[in-house]
Image (tube, grey):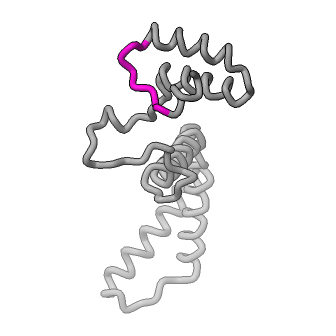
Amino acid sequence: MSQNSEQQRLLSEAYQSAKAADNMIVPMAKTDVIILQAAAQAVATAGFKQKRFMLPLSAAASILIVAGVVLKIAVFSNDPALSSAVTVNKKQPMYMLQRSKHSAEEIMLQQINLLLDQGESAQARSLYKKFLDLYPHYDVSAGLREKLQ
């Protein structure tokens, strides 16, 4: 430690003499060595403190950036593979933009047509009678009514 105080004293003397001479003299080579040694010692004693939060923080930031980019591509892309199957028509209210499923009436009529195509006219007529009982006000096409009679 006495060597450290000696170096500081020599350094202080060198700066004082340079200041006194109005910065006209060039510092001694020994002054450069003293400065380098003092800097090396300061760095060695300070050490490198590990910041344990840096790795998790950088990982979280990376995940957040990737998620943001993926969402932006998926939401704002005009690519039909990435967009949903629902097409947006701005003239229709939102509840009408949902995918429509076939109604029970349409499913029963499809089954009746399938039975007729397979030659099962007796079963088709039976199912048609049930259809008329369930949905008496449903307008059945004339072609289907002719097939069933």
* Image coordinates for residue 12, horizontal then vertical, percent: 42, 68
Magenta-drawn stretch, dominant element (helix, strand or loop): loop
Q: Is residue 65 visible?
A: no
The stretch of residues the image draws in magenta is 135-142
Return the x and y of residue 36 as percentages of the image width and height. 58, 69
Which residue does the image show at 72% across and 20% down from the upper left? 120
User: Is residue 16 something that shows in the picture?
Assistant: yes
Relative image position of residue 23 (x, y in whole percent):
35, 87
Queried whether the magenta region covers residue 1, the answer comes back as no
**In the picture provided, is 56 more to the left or to the right than 75?**
right
- In the image, 76 versus 142, the foreground residue is 142
Indicate the position of residue 94 as horizontal and vertical percent values. 30, 36
**Can you tell which quarter of the image residue 4 is in?**
bottom right
Q: Is residue 90 left or right of residue 70?
A: left
89 and 21: which one is in front?
89
Q: Is residue 91 left or right of residue 132?
A: left
Q: Residue at x 62, y 28 (%)?
A: 113
The answer to whether residue 51 is above or below residue 95 is below
Question: In the figure, 95 relative to 59: above or below?
Answer: above
18 or 73: nearer the eye? 73
